[in-house]
């Protein structure tokens, strides 16, 4: 044992891979001086794996068993076409860096943060995030904190201070799960903090949308229905070079239009795009959609939707997109498309 028994009945064991926290109901397995800690459910499979790993290799093969074990040294004669076999090589990797952590439940008061490199939480976004986590704490979203065990045995949070501060605001969460590492010094801690935060890949808007649809989010499902009813579909890739005709990616603009103007106007703008640009890649779809929403949300008294489709068909989607060349900002591009489309609409009116 590494230390005494905690008030909750848990204690730590020193293993070859670091310290392991033992909870009530855990199973401790020891073999040849090596120690493991597993849950009751994991134990049978783990022990079976140990048996397999310690099984002695077969060094002698009796008569008639060579082919069974694949160790025959006889050369087989083959006729006809010979087949060459190649062994698939595994990719080469650098050895792992550092030692494996211990996974422990740590009481909140034993944890701290080092302000010399840790992010400040004295700002409104951090305060809102901490309050939100505390108000609706969900263990399913609480990944273990990354913690440094220093030479004086103090525990410093590398990653997870918002979860820690949120749990500290409650009186029903006395401890949190932690991955505990030993670092050489504060400089290495700070480097690991930088790596942990820079390595995160934020969700893009399309990942967020598809995850929300899978979670049956009402807003996402409504957006999906509006787009599908218009004859379009949401692209899976944010890169326009990978889009197929009829695919769009401006989910934020569609959601904003539904909130401001309702599904009817949003659907009408999307339907006009589907009708005007069949079999065309909609690389500039966001700007075109923005211009159409501006038109349809404030139509003239004698506005003719059919004439609008004809006006849109006077150019390709890419040609309409050229109207936004050099312009920045969604509203600026949408305004430019609004003006260009209305000029074409007026020309159609004069032609009739």
Image (tube, rainbow, N blue to C red):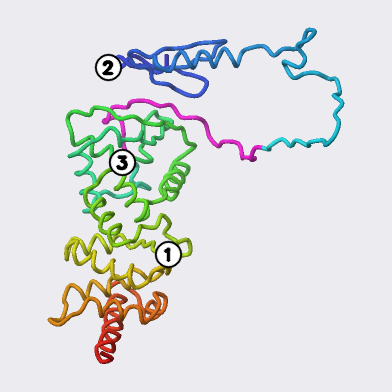
- Horizontal side of 94 relative to 18 (left or right) equals right
Which of these two is toward me, 153 or 131?
131
Q: Which mark is residue 161?
A: 3
Cα separation between marks 2 and 1? 61 Å
- Horizontal side of 91 relative to 173 (left or right) equals right
- Horizontal side of 330 relative to 297 (left or right) equals right
Q: Splitting the image into 4 quarters, where does residue 282 fall?
A: bottom left
* First to last magenta residue range: 90-113
Cα separation between marks 3 and 2? 24 Å
Is residue 154 positioned above or below 218 on the image? Answer: above
Name the residue that disc number 2 marks: 8
- The residue most toward the top is 62
Badge 3 marks a residue whose secondary structure is helix
Identify the image quadrant of the N terminus.
Answer: top left
Q: Splitting the image into 4 quarters, where does residue 138 fall?
A: top left
Of label 3 and label 2, which has the lower sequence position? Answer: 2
Within 10 Å of the Cα at label 2, are there few (<14), some (14-19), or many (20+) other Cα atoms? few
Q: Are marks 2 and 1 in contact (CB under 8 Å)?
A: no
Name the residue that disc number 1 marks: 245
Query: Can you tell which of label 1 and label 3 is closer to the viewer?
Result: 1
Is residue 93 positioned above or below 273 on the image? Answer: above
- The residue most toward the left is 301
Residue under the point 42% across and 75% down: 318
Residue under the point 22% across and 35% down: 168
Badge 1 marks a residue whose secondary structure is loop
Q: Position of residue 220 (x, y in %)?
A: 26, 52
Residue 106 is covered by the magenta coloring: yes
Residue 140 is covered by the magenta coloring: no
């Amino acid at each position: 044992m590494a230390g005494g028994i905690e008030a909750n009945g848990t204690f730590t064991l020193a293993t070859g891979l670091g310290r392991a926290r033992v909870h009530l109901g855990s199973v401790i397995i020891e073999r040849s001086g090596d120690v493991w800690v597993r849950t009751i459910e994991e134990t049978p499979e783990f022990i079976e794996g140990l048996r397999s790993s310690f099984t002695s290799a077969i060094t002698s093969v009796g008569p008639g068993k060579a082919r069974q074990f694949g160790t025959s040294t006889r050369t087989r004669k083959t006729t006809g076409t010979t087949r060459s076999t190649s062994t698939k090589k595994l990719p080469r990797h650098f050895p792992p860096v550092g030692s494996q952590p211990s996974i422990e439940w740590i009481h909140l008061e034993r944890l701290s943060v080092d302000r010399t490199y840790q992010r400040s939480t004295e700002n409104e976004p951090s305060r809102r995030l901490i309050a939100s986590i505390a108000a609706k704490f969900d263990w399913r979203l609480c990944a273990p904190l990354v913690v440094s065990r220093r030479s004086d045995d103090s525990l410093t949070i590398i990653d997870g201070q918002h979860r820690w501060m949120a749990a500290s605001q409650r009186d029903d969460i006395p401890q949190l799960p932690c991955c505990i590492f030993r670092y050489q010094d504060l400089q290495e801690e700070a480097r690991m903090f930088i790596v942990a935060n820079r390595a995160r890949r934020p969700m893009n808007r399309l990942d967020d949308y598809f995850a929300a649809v899978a979670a049956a989010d009402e807003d996402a499902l409504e957006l999906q229905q509006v787009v599908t009813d218009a004859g379009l579909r949401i692209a899976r890739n944010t890169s326009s070079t990978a889009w197929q005709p009829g695919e769009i990616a401006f989910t934020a603009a569609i959601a904003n239009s539904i909130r401001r103007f309702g599904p009817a106007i949003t659907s009408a703008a999307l339907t006009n795009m589907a009708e005007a640009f069949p079999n065309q890649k909609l690389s500039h779809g966001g700007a075109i959609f923005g211009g159409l929403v501006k038109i349809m949300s404030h139509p003239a008294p004698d506005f003719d939707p059919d004439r609008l489709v004809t006006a849109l068909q006077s150019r390709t989607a890419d040609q309409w997109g050229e109207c936004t060349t050099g312009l920045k900002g969604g509203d600026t591009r949408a305004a430019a498309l609004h003006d260009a489309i209305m000029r074409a609409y007026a020309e159609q009116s004069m032609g009739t």
